[in-house]
């Protein structure tokens, strides 16, 4: 395994562990999701170069588009939950109370 693959896998694993274990604020969960998307974007950007496959060159742009949409939706949820509940703590957000 090359050092670049190891760094992408470790970045994705650390951000998923951060998402799993550090669930106090919504903003920290959104940051973990963004770091997961960033590591996937970098891995998808380097993969066509390593394999000399020009057909997969559009895939990172598509991933970046979905990442921007996910970030916008997450920030909208953050603002809406802060306005309605007064904070961004995840334990205040309960779907059964809506």
Image: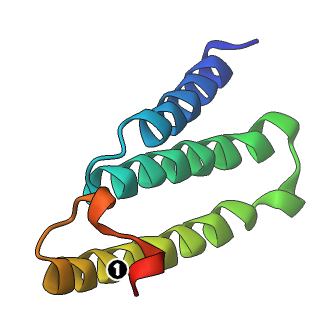
Identify the residue at horizontal 45%, vertical 42% (top origin): 19
For the point 54% across and 42% down, which residue is it?
39
Q: Nearer the viewer, residue 67 or 14?
A: 14
Badge 1 element: helix
The number of numbered discs placed on residues in the rendered structure image is: 1
In the visual, does 88 lie left or right of 32?
Answer: left
Q: Is residue 28 left or right of residue 63?
A: left
Q: Residue 41 placed where, x, y %?
A: 59, 51
Q: Is residue 53 above or below residue 6?
A: below
Percent position of residue 71, x then y: 41, 71
To which residue does mark 1 refer? 77
- Residue 8 x, y percent position in the rendering: 59, 30
Left or right: residue 35 versus residue 2 is left
| Colour scheme shown | rainbow
Coordinates of residue 46 in the picture (x, y in percent): 67, 41
In the displayed structure, does residue 59 sit left or right of residue 71? right
Residue shown at 67% from the left, 71% from the top:
62
| Residue found at x 32% / y 59% | 90
Q: Is residue 42 above or below residue 59?
A: above
Depicted 41 relative to depicted 60: above or below: above
Q: For the residue carrying disc 1, how many other residues have a C-alpha within 10 Å: few (<14), some (14-19), or many (20+)?
A: some
Residue furthest left in the image: 86
Residue 4 picture quarter: top right
Q: Is residue 3 above or below residue 21?
A: above
Quadrant showing the N terminus: top right
Q: Tell me the quarter of the image containing the C terminus.
A: bottom left
């Amino acid at each position: 395994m090359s050092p670049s693959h190891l760094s992408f896998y470790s970045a994705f694993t650390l951000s998923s562990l951060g998402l799993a274990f550090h669930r106090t604020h919504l903003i920290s969960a959104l940051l973990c999701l963004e770091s997961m998307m960033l590591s996937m974007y970098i891995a998808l950007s380097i993969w066509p170069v390593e394999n000399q496959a020009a057909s997969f060159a559009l895939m990172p742009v598509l991933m970046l588009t979905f990442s921007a949409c996910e970030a916008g939706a997450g920030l909208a949820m953050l603002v809406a939950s802060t306005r309605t509940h007064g904070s961004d703590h995840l334990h205040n957000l309960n779907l059964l109370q809506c």
